[in-house]
Image (cartoon, rainbow, N blue to C red):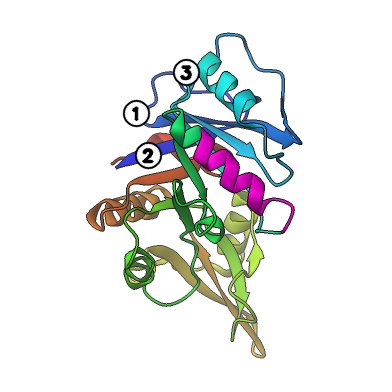
Amino acid sequence: MNIYMIYSAKEQIAKNSKLLCGIHSYVAHGNTVMSEKLPSDLCGNIMVISAQNAGEHISPAVYDECRKRKFTSVFLDAEEPCKNNIRAFCEISESLSRRGLRVFCPIAFEEFCPQAIPVADTCISGGVLSEYLKSLIVGRKRLALSLPRMCASFPMPPEDSCGNALSPRELSRLRDMHDAEVFFSPAMLLNYFIYSPSPRDAGFVLFDDSHTVTEKLRLAKKLGVSDVFLRYCELSDIADDIWF
């Protein structure tokens, strides 16, 4: 299983990282590849490009950047399929695959990009993560995963599956404020604690740390997932403690 840590151009890239390196500093604008200013010697394993507004003939520009930076894979990132990008994604994934690059796309685009490896999100706020992943794997030859860091509070009962996002500082303050005891959920592979600021109000918090991220990586490998994506901006404080 390939594990990629995705960086922006502004983040310090750990040259001795045990994980593969991805660069997320690219935006497609028509048939042009735009990016932050990158060091001339910057290289990586995968190019992550925001391709929502990509043109159908952007493939040569993407391929040239991959050759320059020694990328062997491309992740075509986008929010959702729409009539303006479906054809472009189809053309780009086919062209880049033909040129020998591994191509990834969000799972919502997989029917339009049969050459690409679909990428699914692993964030859940209930249920059993292993069963959820197994349901995604069934019927697919390949599957990659994005592992966003969960850190959110939820009222009881939960109003939605997203909750209210918390920063590491907010998480720490909430734990201290309620003197909360933290538990580990083997079903979700998440840490959690329950708080009750008043008799009428109660909620719970779900959050990842290096242990839960490592456990999710182990589960992904056990299930035969081909590739996993982590974001350095979310994991910078625990990145060195993720062992796999």
x then y, percent, for residue 109: 56, 56
Give the residue number, with chain letter if any, for mark 2.
3
Residue shown at the point (43%, 63%) measured from the top left: 191
SS for callout 3: loop
Front position among marks 1 and 3: 3
Look at mark 3 in the image and give the residue it sits on: 70
Q: Secondary structure at mark 1?
A: loop
Task: Find disc 1 in the rendering and name its residue.
Answer: 18
- Label 3, label 2: how far apart the Cα atoms are: 17 Å
Residue located 53% across and 35% down the image: 95
Amino acid type, residue under disc 1 in the picture: Lys
Q: Position of residue 99 (x, y in %)?
A: 46, 28
Question: Where is 170 relative to 156, above or below?
Answer: above
Distance between the alpha carbons at the discs numbered 1 and 3:
18 Å
Q: Are marks 2 and 1 in contact (CB under 8 Å)?
A: no
Magenta part of the chain? 83-95
